[in-house]
Amino acid sequence: MKVLECSGEIFENIQKMAPVVHNISNYITATDCANMTLACGGSPTMADDPEEVEDIASACAGSVINMGNTAGHYQESMLRTGKINNKVGHPVLLDPVGAGAAKRRNAVLENLLQEIHFSAIRGNISEIKFVGDKSSGAKGVDAADEDLASEDTIEGIVKYAKALAARMETIIIISGPIDVVADAEKAYMIRNGHPMMSRVTGTGCMLSSALGVFLSANPDNMLEAAAVCVSAYGYAGELAYEKVQETKGGTGSLRMYLMDAMSNMDNKCFLHGAKIEEAV
């Protein structure tokens, strides 16, 4: 299926369904993630108490598990959320924030991957490489410079994403200078976005929340829905940067304009700015 041919249906499904999406996020970005969910046409719930997440998640259309917090009760909440989504057959996305950064965080990640089947996994290239084979050289939550996608390395990254997607039976979404969205059979390369987005904390977390909306509203077409979401979000970043330049603003303005652009994004706007290429 050609992704640009089905984008109208993907946006229409969001508007029809207005999916309620359960997010387990970190305290730094929870408000932005909730607002991005709303901007995309969904409705957020941010419950993280392990005693209620199963009830909450099962009543929602899908969930996003963000590993920004792994302390205290969060590990049990993430585990219960993932398992109940698997039980009821709802999409669940993992954002392995900081994968490879610390032994305890890595142990939490390993447990989640063993116990839960994720519909999609989104991270930067270093996080995804750690998920795949523990080869990441990242420091903290940022991708290692040597891992980042370029025109010289993108072919290898696409092959890696497809192989990992096949092994884990999931959709792999790699954020970077060139984004990659892949399952075992097909991959998309996306060249939307602006470098200034990396200077605003939470832009990756917000993308994961946006993906939660697109996947939950399109459970039968998740690969293309993910590609449309990543491209639309990147294009929103481009539009936000244009507004920053017009208003002589900075990173705080970019954050606001990014939210505005996603709240105004529709298929017509998307098609005007989408830069998606199917990998061959």
Image (cartoon, rainbow, N blue to C red):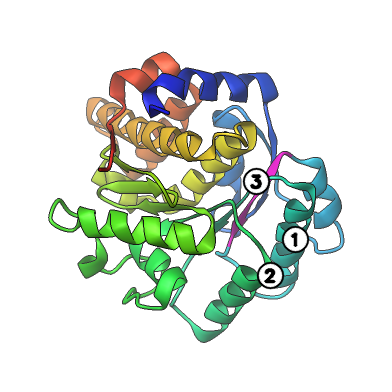
First in sequence, mark 3 or 1: give its number: 1
Quarter containing the N terminus: top left
Task: Kindly check if marks 1 and 2 are in contact, taking CB atoms under 8 A apart as contact.
Answer: yes
In the rendered image, the residue lying farthest to the front is 185
- Amino acid type, label 1: Lys
Is residue 89 positioned above or below 24 on the image?
Answer: above
Instruction: Return the residue at label 3.
Output: 91
Kind of residue indicated by mark 3: Pro
Q: CA distance from mark 2 to mark 3?
A: 15 Å
| Magenta-colored span | 61-66
Is residue 31 visible in the rendered image? The answer is yes
Quadrant location, the C terminus: top left
Q: Position of residue 86 (x, y in %)?
A: 73, 54
Image position, residue 255 (x, y; %): 41, 40
Is 153 in front, or is 48? 153
Q: Which residue is mark 2?
A: 115
Q: Nearer the viewer, residue 241 or 273?
A: 273
**Residue 224 drawn above or below residue 246:** below
For the question of whether residue 149 can be seen, the reply is no
Q: Going 67% across and 64% down the picture, which residue do you hit?
A: 116
Element at label 2 = helix
